[in-house]
Structure formats: structure tokens, C-alpha cells
Image (cartoon, helix red, strand yellow):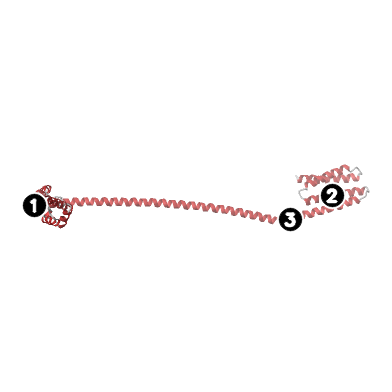
């Protein structure tokens, strides 16, 4: 917009100057050319008013041109030239002042350009640093996430491996226990198979031994003697006593009770009587203690 008004004003001044020269030479009235010149002057001033130096310079320049035209006209018409020369001097001062201010402003703008460039460079540097920091922070966050995921996976893999190892250990133990149980059963079966078959004498001696124990108490040796008295061989009698399943401590206690029911005994006398019946010392002691002696 400023450039438009300045161009229109400059064109109007040129046209007005030409008309003034023509009207002055022809000695025609100058009112209309001066009005056009004034309007053009105002338009040029408005177009150049964005800068103080340019504003003053344009006033001075237009004034110089207009004054020179006036001087030509006044000279042709032989009119007094004092006032035009005063106006010419004032316009020259304005023009010089405007040029000086414009030069100073240009120098200041030129000198401020490095500062602006430096400020712009610093701003770009700060923005680049911020962008680099954001990239670095994102990379660090991504790495932390990846490390955490790797740690979680390693922990999960270790848990799976530990469970597999525990399951294998349990399975191995179960297999070992089963193998041991199978071996024990096989050993027992082998031992049973290795036992000699029961003879008729052993079978009868065993049955007789159980019958005697159902009737009264016997020691191991006493039961063998009783079976021998019944006519069984030493081997058959021993077999019957060994396999009758008697608890000899319980037999001692039962025998002690029978003796006390029959007659009175001292503790030591009862122990001696049980030993006499074939019980061991420990079995006799147990039997006497069991009946409360």
C-alpha cells in the first residue's frame, strides 16, 4: 500500500512539474498545477511515511523539485526570487537530514543483523539440542523397555526351566521309589520261593505250639521243651516255637500274672521263677514290671 501511494505521488509530481513549466512559459494561471502538485506531494509523503528518514528525505526532494519549478516560473515572469530561494534552502536541509537519518538507520539495521543472526542461530541450536535430547530420551526409554522385556523373558525362562528340573527330579524320585519297591517285592518273593517247603512234622509242631499258647503262657525254650515232650523232634519243635508269632515279653507278663494268681512271690523270686521257666533275664524283668512289681 505504501509503495502504491509513493508511486502515484511521484508520477503526479512529474506530471505537475511538466504542466507548471508549460503553464509558466505560456503565462497561464498556475492554481490547478499547484493543487495537483500538492496532492502528489501528500501522496508521496504518505507512501514514504514508513520510515522517518525516508519521510524527511522525500519532503526535501519534492520541495527541491517544486521550488526549482517555482524558480523557473518566477524567473520567466520576472517575479521576486527571495521566497523561493528560502524554501529551496529549507528543502535542501530536509533532504540532507532525511538522507542522514536513512543512512544511520541502514547502518543500525546492518549492525543489528549479526545479532539477529546470532540470536536465530542460538535459537536453532537450542531447538536442535532439545530435539536431540528428545531423541536421546526416547532411545533411552526404548532401551529400558527392551531391557525390562529381556529381563522378564529371562525370568520366565528360568521359572520354566526350574519347574522342568523339579518335575524331572520328582519323576526320577518316583521312578527310583517304584524301582526300590519292585526290588523289595522281588526280593521278598525270591526269599519266599527260597524257603523250603513245610514238612508234616513242622506243620503239626506249629499248630501244637499255637494251641499251647492259647491255653497258657510259655517261654520260647519252655515251648520247645513242651513240644519235645509231646514227641516232636528238636528241629520240628524249634520250628514251631520260632514261627508261632508269640511276643515273648507279653508271654513273660502273662506267666507272671498266672503265678501271682496261684501264690505269692517276691519280686526277685518271681524273676527267678520266670527265668527257671526259660525266659531271659530281660523278659523276666519286663514281665514282673508289667504286673506292677
Camera-side residue of 102 and 7: 102
Tell me the SS state at disc 1. helix
The circle on residue 63 is 2
Mark 3 or mark 2: name the one nearer the start of the chain: 2
Q: Position of residue 121 (x, y in %)?
A: 64, 55
Q: Is residue 226 above or below residue 35?
A: below
Tell me the SS state at disc 3. helix
Name the residue rendered at 88%, 52% in the picture: 86
User: From the viewer's perspective, is 22 left or right of 210?
Assistant: right
- Contact? badges 3 and 1 (CB < 8 Å): no
User: From the viewer's perspective, is 178 left or right of 156?
Assistant: left
Camera-side residue of 35 and 173: 173
Q: Nearer the viewer, mark 3 or mark 2?
A: 3
Label tally: 3
Q: Position of residue 278 (x, y in %)?
A: 11, 55
Which part of the image, by quadrant, shows the C terminus? bottom left
Q: Position of residue 90 (x, y in %)?
A: 85, 52
Camera-side residue of 162 and 110: 162
Q: Residues within 10 Å of mark 3 (few under 14, many from 20)?
A: few
Mark 2 or mark 1: name the one nearer the start of the chain: 2
User: From the viewer's perspective, is 150 left or right of 220?
Assistant: right
Tell me the SS state at disc 2. helix
Q: Which residue is mark 1?
A: 226
Alpha-carbon distance for marks 2 and 1?
169 Å
Q: Residues within 10 Å of mark 1 (few under 14, many from 20)?
A: some
Which part of the image, by quadrant, shows the N terminus? top right
Q: Which residue is mark 3?
A: 108
Q: Position of residue 287 (x, y in %)?
A: 16, 53
The circle on residue 132 is none
Camera-side residue of 138 and 238: 238
- Contact? badges 3 and 2 (CB < 8 Å): no
Q: Nearer the viewer, mark 2 or mark 1?
A: 1
Amino acid at each position: 500500500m505504501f509503495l502504491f501511494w509513493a508511486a502515484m505521488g511521484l508520477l503526479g509530481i512529474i506530471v505537475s512539474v511538466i504542466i507548471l513549466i508549460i503553464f509558466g512559459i505560456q503565462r497561464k494561471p498556475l492554481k490547478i498545477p499547484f493543487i495537483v502538485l500538492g496532492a502528489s506531494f501528500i501522496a508521496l509523503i504518505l507512501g514514504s511515511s514508513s520510515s522517518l528518514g525516508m519521510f524527511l528525505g522525500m519532503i526535501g526532494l519534492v520541495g527541491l523539485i517544486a521550488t526549482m519549478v517555482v524558480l523557473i516560473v518566477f524567473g520567466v515572469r520576472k517575479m521576486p526570487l527571495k521566497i523561493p530561494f528560502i524554501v529551496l534552502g529549507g528543502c535542501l536541509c530536509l533532504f540532507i537530514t532525511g538522507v542522514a537519518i536513512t543512512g544511520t538507520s541502514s547502518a543500525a539495521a546492518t549492525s543489528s543483523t549479526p545479532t539477529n543472526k546470532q540470536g536465530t542461530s542460538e535459537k536453532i541450536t537450542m531447538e536442535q539440542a532439545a530435539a536431540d535430547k528428545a531423541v536421546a530420551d526416547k532411545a533411552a526409554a526404548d532401551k529400558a523397555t527392551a531391557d525390562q522385556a529381556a529381563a522378564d523373558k529371562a525370568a520366565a525362562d528360568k521359572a520354566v526351566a526350574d519347574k522342568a528340573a523339579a518335575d524331572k527330579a520328582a519323576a526320577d524320585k518316583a521312578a527310583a521309589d517304584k524301582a526300590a519297591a519292585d526290588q523289595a517285592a522281588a526280593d521278598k518273593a525270591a526269599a519266599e520261593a527260597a524257603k523250603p517247603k513245610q514238612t508234616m512234622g513242622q506243620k503239626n509242631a506249629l499248630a501244637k505250639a499255637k494251641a499251647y499258647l492259647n491255653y497258657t503262657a510259655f517261654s520260647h525254650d519252655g515251648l520247645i521243651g513242651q513240644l519235645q515232650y509231646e514227641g516232636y523232634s528238636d528241629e520240628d519243635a524249634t520250628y514251631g516255637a520260632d514261627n508261632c508269632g508269640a511276643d515273648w515279653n507279653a508271654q513273660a507278663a502273662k506267666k507272671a500274672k498266672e503265678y501271682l494268681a496261684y501264690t505269692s512271690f517276691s519280686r526277685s523270686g518271681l524273676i527267678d521263677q520266670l527265668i527257671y521257666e526259660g525266659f531271659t533275664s530281660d523278659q523276666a524283668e519286663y514281665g514282673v514290671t508289667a504286673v506292677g512289681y
